[in-house]
Every structure is written in structure tokens, then in C-alpha cells.
Amino acid sequence: MSLTLTVDGPRWRAHLEDVARTHPGLVPVAKGNGYGFTLGRLARKTQWLADREHDVTTLAVGTYDELPEVASRWRGDVLVLTPWRPFVEPVDPALARRVVHTVSRYDDLRALLAAEPEARLVLEHATSMRRHGMTGRELWDAGALLRKHPGARVEGVALHLPLQQGSHLGEVNRILTSTVAADAGLTTAWVSHLTDAELKSLSASWPDFTFRPRIGTSLWLGDRGALKVTATVLDVHPVERGDVFGYRGRTAPKSGHVLVVSGGTAHGIGLEAPTGDQSVKARAATLARGGLDAIGFVRSPYSIEGKQRLFAEPPHMQASMLFVPQGARVPEVGDQVDVRVRYTATTFDRIVVEG
């Protein structure tokens, strides 16, 4: 009676090892809902990679609030991706030497060094994302300040690059030139969203730099064939055209069956994040979904025999109602149906690793 994520264990682990083997200095990213796996599981799997003698010494989390869940399951360093701010609660002293702060503003660097003179940190340089980061001039000022605080451990410069913006090489080359000019002893670049070809090119162009790729999605979710999501059929009700059903008293548009399946808004079913696809096809699909919604028909993520079925009404908290028209195969109570989900926005009742 669950929304279940089933993992082909041998295939998934082989993929994780392949990514670790081909990305020296890998920094696995475990944040949010743990890409559907939970933070604790990803922390344990990161430790497994390290125990297998892969070059994995640091795990990245999204926020300071995520530190406790991973720190007891992973023995190495932890990089916090959200930049440090003066209002952040102090880190547990037992973890302080393992935590690497991200600092994205000069004023914050000054405040952090006043609070923790021996803090470990990376300096974030602004990129074309325009989310966080210092300008080249601010990085130069940061270098001058750090030279007055020899107790601080500066682990490098951090770059968070945009997705799907063509080659990043020109931008990264400019940033690294700025980094060298800052004279802050920065010889490690912690990078996100670079292709393997870009990493290889940068390593050749900047032999004095060590590149630490921070990877989340393509590590944990890179082999989708190893992952399967299913829901349990909880009830089946035959309906005739005009029959009333559901919370909102909708009427059946024609004869068929209403299926009640596990998975609802508490799991993230039916909650859709804005898409980054700006193509004409994507916008047309959005308009089509809006039109279906207006008349009560919305395509669900649930599939029966390879065909996505429509929601009979908006998902409930822990279950959803689907409409299956007459003539289509109707599953029985207890059967499993496939579900297509966005892993970063889904909470599963059960995670089963097979093998």
C-alpha cells in the first residue's frame, strides 16, 4: 500500500563507482530530500565510496540544518553550499573542524573570521547565474583580509555555473584569472555543472589548480534504468457516465473505472515545479495541460500498460484517483502500477534496494 522506489542495487552501485572513478576529487551532493533517497542513505553511500578507496573526501549539503543527518553517517568533511551569513546558528563544536563554509560576501568573511578565526572556508566567485558570489575586486579584498588571518583554512574558490548555457570555458577561464590575481592562495576550484570535456580542458589549461566537481543529479540519478517507482492499487470502482465521485463531486465523463492508488500530495504527486524548458513544444504542452485542467482532465504520472492515465480529480494527501475508460485493462486491488516522478520533489513510503 505504498509509493515505492525500487533500486537495482548492483547496477546503481556500479554507476556510482563509475562516476567516482572518472571524476577525481568528486564531491557528492546530498541536499533537500536526498534526490528521493533521503540524506542519510546518500551519506552512507558516500562513505561506502570512500571505503572502496575512491577519491572522495568531502560531502556537500545544501544547508546547515542538514548537517546533523549526514555527519553521523559520513566520517569525512562536509561542505555547506548555502553561503554563510552572520545570523547562522553556530555549528556544533564536535563538527566544526569537519565543516567547510561557503563565503560569498566580503562583509560575511570579516564576520566569520571574527567569530571563528580558524574557520575552514571556500570563497564563492560570482558567475553568470548571478545568485551568490564575490566580484573579482571583492575577491582581491578578501585575499588581503585573509593574509591577516593565517589561522583560517581557505580551501579554494567555488563556482556555481548555470545549466544549458553552452560552453562554460570562457567564463571559468576569466574567473580563474581573477582568482589568481586575488593572491589568496586559492589553488582549488570547487565547480558545478561542468561537462567532462570542460573539466579535462580546464585541467590541462590550469595545471596548478585542482578541480573538485560537485555532482548530485548525474551521480545519484544518472542511471535511471536502475530505478523504478511503483504505486499500489488500493481500490477499483466501476462508474457509468454521470456518476458522482470524489471530494469535489465530479461526474464521470463516460463509462469506465475510478482507481484509487497510493501516492498523493504528501509524496509530491501532482506538485509540479516550474520547468526550465522554453521551447515552443514545451509551452504548447503547458497550454494543453491548462486546458485539460479547466475541464477536469489532467494527465497523471501513473501508467498502466505504458499509457499515462488521467487524474479523476486532484490528488488527495496520500492517495490519488485515476479514471480508466471502458475497454482499457483495469488492474486489480493490490496490483502495482508504474509512476513517473521528479525524484527531487518526491518522498517515498518505501525504498527497496534489491541485491
Image: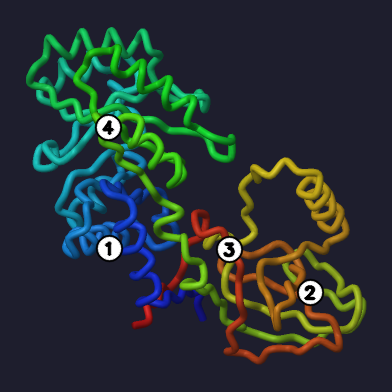
Dot 1 lies on which element? helix
Disc number lying in front (4 or 2): 4
Q: Earlier in the sequence, mark 2 or mark 1?
A: 1
The kind of residue on which mark 1 rests is Lys
The amino acid on which the numbered mark 2 sits, given as a three-letter code, is Phe
Residue located beneath label 3 in the image: 341
Mark 2 and mark 1: Cα distance apart in space:
45 Å
* Vertical comparison of 156 with 6: above or below: above
Packing grade of label 4 (10 A; few <14, some 14-19, many >=20) is: few
How is the structure coloured here?
Answer: rainbow
Label 1 packing within 10 angstroms: few (<14), some (14-19), many (20+): some
Helix, strand or loop status at disc 4: loop
Left/right placement of residue 285 relative to residue 343 reads right
* Residue at image mark 2: 245
User: Residue at horizontal 28%, vertical 12%?
Assistant: 182
The amino acid on which the numbered mark 3 sits, given as a three-letter code, is Val
